[in-house]
Structure formats: structure tokens, C-alpha cells
Image (cartoon, rainbow, N blue to C red):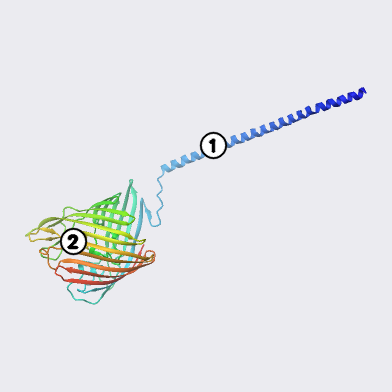
Amino acid sequence: MIRMTLMSGAAAVALLAAPGMAAAQDTAALEARIALLEAQLAALKSEVVASRDQQTAQQQAVAQDIIRIEQRAAAAPPAPPAAPADGFRMGNNLVKFGGFVKADFIASDYDGGDPANGDLLRDFYLPGSIPVGGADESTATDFNARQTRFWLTTEGLLGGRKVGTRLEMDFQVLPGAGDQRTTSPANLSLRRAYVTVDNWLFGQEWTNFQNLAVLPDTADYIGSSEGTVFARQVQVRYTKGPFSISVENPETTVTPYLGATRIIADDSSLPDLTARYAFTGTWGEASLAGIVRQLSYETTGVGAIDSSTLGWGLSAAAKIKVGERDDLRLMLSGGEGIGRYIGLNFANDAVLDATGELEAIGVVAGLVSYRHIWTPQWRSNLTWSAQNVDNDLTLIGAATNKSAQSLRGNLIWTPLPALDLGAELMVGERELESGVSGEMTRLQVFAKYGF
């Protein structure tokens, strides 16, 4: 009995002790797990620290490389920028070359006489050279390639300033000897030659009194000759935005008293002064230009002449957009003593009176031209041009130019980029103060390729 009681007590003690032993085992396992996690965390911290040290070392190395590259770049001269596809580098300058080849096929009829072989009128429309008073001859045919042109330009920076040059030449001057029998020769002729420094231009360029943008698109070299301001000469020009001012080569053309010839005088002591202001907008572009001149003529010996007078002129020009692709081009010029600048010197600048004093000759000239784009490859131009001279009939001879006008229309095809093939029909008329007039009719076909 006692034995059974003891056994029962031992069992009870064992049952009471079991939960405590289990709790102790769980605590030991938890502590072991915590110890393992702490060991893993310590290892992870070590890896993070090592990675951070490595990254810092790499950043320091990259920084040192950048410093060395910058030091080398500062010590070495900068490499010039790559030249574009249409030019090449020569020292500090970007050099470009271009131009065009043009062949003209001309058939002309003159009702007042036939100009001699080699006369420039046979190649270009010169209103002051239209024959008058002669007999009508059969149609004259001429081929030439003298409008062929090339140009060379440079652009660069020198001492922090933008510097450029342009040299342009063609073949529009006939040689002193030679004709079309064998080689149809022509001499190389200077057109433009100037240098620009920032806003300044020095050298031979189109006069600042002229607006090139409104010149009609014609087969002839100028086309609307009698109504156009046209001159290239040596000058000094300053341009600031839309405004430009220049001093240009002076030259005076004089009509003798009761004569009709031309005296070319170089006696002016002051340069011609011009100013021009340009306007642009979504409608197109326009300009207003003015010129002031000293007209001078001086001779020595018996009956010596020493006379000067003032010449002045204004010219307004515009190219106005019509629709999406067409445009209207206009020019109106007038003044006194500016004959040299208009119509290829159709009128002289001044005339001598009976006492040897100069009197400026008044002139008014203009043009209207409409360009229509039929398709991207086809276009047409219709152009009318005219000039009227206000001569003093008591001072000039009856053979002096009084007026000129012309009307022309063309059709031009561009089958390939930069290649134009076209045909133009024109009629021009010249009239003298005597009332005698002459007319020329011309068909001109051309091929022109620009490069």
C-alpha cells in the first residue's frame, strides 16, 4: 500500500516537472537561434562596410582620373570642330566652294539694226544698247556659257572676332582678241571680293542701295534691267540688325552740253553714302534705301571746267508672299544724279550747261514681277520693267536716252535638284528724246546646274 502510494507520488512529481523541463529546452533553443542571427547580422555588417570602403576607393579613383583628364585638356589646344559636309577646314577657317555652270541659247530680232558680233547686247539685255533708227535684219542666234560662275568663302574666329571672306568670279568679259570661230573665249572677271569682321564689310560687294532679294527669277542675267538698281563696287559697310550704312566708290557719268555721249569722270572727292533698312514678317520682306552723292567733273587747260553738284535717290523694294508658294516682287526707285545706279547706267548722272556747270538728271524706274509655282518642279515668272529719264531738253542732244521698258515671261523646269532648264520670251524697247525708237524680241533657252 505504502509502495503504491510512493509510486503514485513519484508519478505526480514527474508530471509536475515536465512542463518546466520543456520550457527550459525552448529557452535554450531560442537563445541558440538569437546567437545565430546575431552572428549572421555581424557578418552582414562586415560585408556592408567592406562594400562601402570599396565604393569609396573607386569614387576616389574616378575623381583622380577626371582631374588628370581636365589637366591634360587644359594643357592641350582644343580640337577644331569637324567640318560640315559642304566644306573643309584650313587652319581656323571653314572653307566652302560653289557656283554654277550655265549655258544660254539665244535668238534675237532687232528692228532698229543689228549689233556687231561680240556686242554684249547679244548675250545680255542692255536697254541702253538696243539699236534704233536702223533697218530690221533677220534673227541672230548666239550660244554662250559666260554666265558660268564660281565662288570661294571662308569663315573663322580670330581673336574672338568672327571673320569671313568671299571671292566670286565669272566669265562675262570678252577677250581683247578672239571670236567665236574656234574657241568662243572669255576672260575671267571679278564680281565680288570682300572680307567681313563682325558687323563690318570691306571690299567689292553689291551696293547697299540695292535689294537683291527682289530681283526677278529670269533667264537673262538681270532681266528687268531698266527698272533695277544694280551696281557692284568697293565699299566699307556697317550692318547692325536690319540697318546698314556704307561709303562706296564715287564715279560720275556726264552728258556734254547739247550732246548725247558719255563722259566718265573720277573727280569726286567724297564717297557715295548709302543707308538701308530692311523689314521682314510673315507676309514677306521689304527695304527702304537712300543715297547721297557728290557729282564732280573737272578739266584743265583752255576752257577748264570745275563743277560739283548734289545727287540723291530713294529706292523701295518688296517681296510679298502670295498664297503658299507664289510671290510678288516690286521695286520703285527715283532721284536726281543716280543714273549710274539704275538700269545699267541707261541715263547719265548729270549734264553740263552752257557755262560748264553740272545739273543733276532726274530719273524714275521700277519693276513688277509675279512668280507662280505650278508644281515643285515647274515655275513661271511674268516681269515688267521700265525707266523714264527727266532730261532738260535745253541742255541735251536729241540722241539722248529718254525711256526704256521690257516685258518677259518664262517657264522653268527643275527635273533634278540644282538643275534648271528653262525658256523665256521677252520684248524690249528703247526711245530717244528725238522720238526715234528701237525694239528687240528675244527667245532665250538655258540650262543651269548649281554646285
Residue 154 lies in quadrant = bottom left
Residue 291 lies in quadrant = bottom left
User: Residue at image x 89%, y 25%?
Assistant: 7
Instruction: Kindly identify the amino acid type of the residue bearing the numbered disc 1.
Output: Thr
Q: Is residue 356 left or right of residue 187?
A: left
**Which image quarter is the C terminus in?**
bottom left
User: Residue at image x 58%, y 37%?
Assistant: 51
User: Residue at image x 29%, y 60%?
Assistant: 214
Marks 1 and 2 close (CB-CB < 8 Å) = no
Disc on res. 363? 2
Q: Position of residue 391 (x, y in %)?
A: 14, 63
* 127 vs 296: above or below: below
Q: Dot 1 corresponds to which residue?
A: 56
Dot 2 crowding, Cα within 10 Å, few <14, some 14–19, many 20+? many
> Residue extending furthest top?
2
User: Residue at image x 34%, y 50%?
Assistant: 156
> Residue extending furthest left?
302
Residue 337 lies in quadrant = bottom left
In this figure, what is the number of numbered marks? 2
Nearest to the observer: residue 94 or residue 399: 399
> Residue extending furthest bottom?
138
Instruction: Kindly identify the amino acid type of the residue bearing the numbered disc 2.
Output: Val
Q: Position of residue 100 (x, y in %)?
A: 33, 63
